[in-house]
Amino acid sequence: MSFDAFDGEDSVNPPPNLKLVAGNSNRPLAAEISELLKVPLTKSHVETFADKEVFVEIHENVRGQHCFIIQSTSFPANDNLMELLVLIDCLKRASAKRITAVIPYFGYARQDRKPKPRTPITAKLVANLIERAGADRVLTLDLHAGQIQGFFDIPTDNLYAAPVIVRDIRGRFDTDDLMVVSPDAGGVVRARELANRLQVPIAICNKWREAPGKASIMSVIGDVAGKRCILLDDIVDSGGTLVSAADALMAGGAIDVHAYITHGVLSGGAASKIRNSHIKSLFITDTILPTEVVRAARNIDVLPIAPLLAKAILRTFREQSVSGLFDSD
């Protein structure tokens, strides 16, 4: 990874009193952030006992240090979440001055409300656990629902992958025939913001069932004929909605369909489903460590998110504005 993403005030010498602690969810991402910041990963040992208990030991002095724990709560979500909590507790008991939980992918974010009676709001529960474990701040990326920031009573920065996505789109496509498409009604605000940045039109896919037990129908709101369509979403899990949206866009006369997603959960046979779909290319960031199957898929590419996270960590450490990262493209 080059250091080209850092310039001017963001160029650094190794910052004093800054410690980077990596969990096991995405070691390559932590290593890239470490290289960019010129701060070695703190020596630590994470062990899982036979009964799946997590044990953590830090092998460096962190007393009085500002520690950043880099850990996504992706698959296996519960193991990685517990590892994050134990790391926070370990650093707190080792007298770290400040602890920032850097959570590139915040698991349980889809459980942010009660969709029906007697269901939990698990995103709030997870926020409580992180806070009670001893975190002083949270740094995350493209939360599924922005209101989750309010579930924390500690400062929480929700970064956006939009600058990374905009830069990549402008480098790959001519915007003259481009159209941004939300794969569902819930993502309209996100799609509109990207469309405004690119100065291109927007369309919306609408999914419904004519009757219980019948197959869902996907329609397109907007004229996509002759357009190169960019589907935008924060999470792709099974890939079903994305594939259905691509089918509807091609049926509507689109030239081709590409997709940009921040978090590539891609569970089960999602990678295979996308490989055999009308989606010409799917771009995901590496907030979640890509599996071998994902890396092997011919139409799935990974955009590095480490430069954005490294800048945000540096600005947080320096007590500078993080929102300034998104003032321009």
Image (cartoon, rainbow, N blue to C red):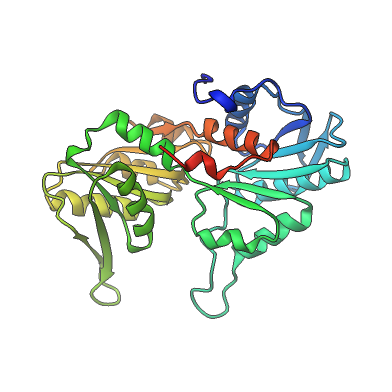
Residue drawn at the location 20% of the way across and 54% of the way down: 248
Q: Name which quarter of the figure residue 119 lies in.
A: bottom right
Q: Name which quarter of the figure residue 259 lies in.
A: top left
In percent of width and height, residue 40 lies at 71, 23
In percent of width and height, residue 267 lies at 46, 48
Work out whether 298 lies above or below 254. Answer: above
In percent of width and height, residue 89 lies at 81, 48
Q: Name which quarter of the figure residue 172 lies in.
A: top left
Q: Is residue 185 left or right of residue 89?
A: left
Residue drawn at the location 78% of the way across and 54% of the way down: 133
Work out whether 184 lies above or below 294. Answer: below
Q: Is residue 288 left or right of residue 59?
A: left
Along the line of sight, the residue nearer the viewer: 249 or 4 = 4
Q: Is residue 202 left or right of residue 239?
A: left
Is residue 115 visible in the rendered structure shown here? yes
Is residue 299 visible in the rendered structure shown here? no
Residue drawn at the location 55% of the way across and 24% of the way down: 8
Along the line of sight, the residue nearer the viewer: 143 or 200 = 200
Q: Residue furthest bottom?
A: 117
Q: Is residue 205 left or right of residue 84?
A: left
Along the line of sight, the residue nearer the viewer: 95 or 320 = 320
